[in-house]
């Protein structure tokens, strides 16, 4: 595998100036009816000078090969002259944004989910990008899809069914993104590609189970809310009994305490407004 070699070729302005001077000389030769020297000068210009002129734009590079041998990479922007026999391949050094398509895969516990990722990448080693793989852009697309699929297979969507899961796709966004970025860098290092950022852009249950899983989530939310309400209600009842006892407002035997606790819990834990009932007798009649 070739390693990148940076070269700095001579300025193209000097070669272009020599080209203009040679054109003037050729014109003078034609003026004096010296066709052969003029023709030789024009052939040299066309074959050796003009093909060697190359322009490198900012954040671009030119990978040069001569008769199948890697010569080097020009990364400095400007106007240069290189060996006219070299093959010049442009490789962009700009950051690329890959908006991956939505993939339907199974998470670690077998639930079908839809997942997609946004990946920002750029070429760091132009020699590997050109010579190590057939098409580095296609290589990035295929390896990115494989990495996203592997990530989805490695973790559950959430911990509703796997309560022991420390990382979930829905709850551990930062950790999942870091793991995806790390795996992509390992996969794309062969092609001289560096991943700058990787984020999950879409995550959802597959349509065939989305409704059922939504019901599970709603049930879990209701249970959690009820648990919180009951804990608060028990605390309020305990506080009420303590206050009544401390201030000697009323003496309650065990049966009256039980009735009071029951009434308070009904009022505090009910999901609808409670209509009070006034007892005009006693608790025992």
Image (cartoon, rainbow, N blue to C red):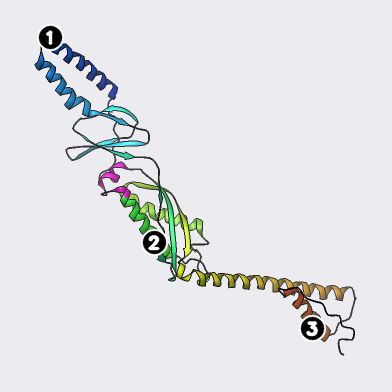
CA gap, disc 2 and disc 1? 75 Å
x and y, in percent, of residue 26 in the image: 16, 15
Secondary-structure class at tag 3: helix
Q: Which residues are magenta?
A: 124-137
Q: Which residue is pictured at 28% across the width and 24% down the height?
A: 12
- Which element type, helix, strand or loop, lies under badge 2? helix
> Which residue shows up at 18% across the image and 40% down it?
68
Q: Are marks 2 and 1 in contact (CB under 8 Å)?
A: no
Instruction: Identify the residue position indicated by label 2 in the image.
Output: 149
Q: Position of residue 243 (x, y in %)?
A: 85, 72
Label 1 SS: loop
Residue that numbered label 3 is attached to: 258
Instruction: Decide whether residue 73 is among the magenta residues.
Output: no
How many marks can you see? 3
Q: Tell which circle, 3 or 1, labels the residue nearer the N-terminal end.
A: 1
In front: 9, or 135? 135
In the rendered image, is residue 201 in sight? yes
Q: Report whether 88 appears left or right of 257.
A: left
- In this rendering, position of residue 108 left or right of residue 45: right
Spot occupied by residue 50 in the image (x, y as percentages of width and height): 22, 26
Q: For label 2, count other residues whose C-alpha is less than 10 Å away and answer few (under 14), some (14-19) or many (20+).
A: some
Cα–Cα span, label 3 and label 1: 126 Å
Viewer-side label of 2, 1: 1
For residue 147, what is the image quadrant?
bottom left
Viewer-nearest residue: 187 or 161 = 161
**Which residue occupies the extreme bottom position in the image?**
285
Mark 1: give few (<14), some (14-19) or many (20+) Cα within 10 Å.
few
Q: Nearer the viewer, mark 3 or mark 1?
A: 1
């Amino acid at each position: 595998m070739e390693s990148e070699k940076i070269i700095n070729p001579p300025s193209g302005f000097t070669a272009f100036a020599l080209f203009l001077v040679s054109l003037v000389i050729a014109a003078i030769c034609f003026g004096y009816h010296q066709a052969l020297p003029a023709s030789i000068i024009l052939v040299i210009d066309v074959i050796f000078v003009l093909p060697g002129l190359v322009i490198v734009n900012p954040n671009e590079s030119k990978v040069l090969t001569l008769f199948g041998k890697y010569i080097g990479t020009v990364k400095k922007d400007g106007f240069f002259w290189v060996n006219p026999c070299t093959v010049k391949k442009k490789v962009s050094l700009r950051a690329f944004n890959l908006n991956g398509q939505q993939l339907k895969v199974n998470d670690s516990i077998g639930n079908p989910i839809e997942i997609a990722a946004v990946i920002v990448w750029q070429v760091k080693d132009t020699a590997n990008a050109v010579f190590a793989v057939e098409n580095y852009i296609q290589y990035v697309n295929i390896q990115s899809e494989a990495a996203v699929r592997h990530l989805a297979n490695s973790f559950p969507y959430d911990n509703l069914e796997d309560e022991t899961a420390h990382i979930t796709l829905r709850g551990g966004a930062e950790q999942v993104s870091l793991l995806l970025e790390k795996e992509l860098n390992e996969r794309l290092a062969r092609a001289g590609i560096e991943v700058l950022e990787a984020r999950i852009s879409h995550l959802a249950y597959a349509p065939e189970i989305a409704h059922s899983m939504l019901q599970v989530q709603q049930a879990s939310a209701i249970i959690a809310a009820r648990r919180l309400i009951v804990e608060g209600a028990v605390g309020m009842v305990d506080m009420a009994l303590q206050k009544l006892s401390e201030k000697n407002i009323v003496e309650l035997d065990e049966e009256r305490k039980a009735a009071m606790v029951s009434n308070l819990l009904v009022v505090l834990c009910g999901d609808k407004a409670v209509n009070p009932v006034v007892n005009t007798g006693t608790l025992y009649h």
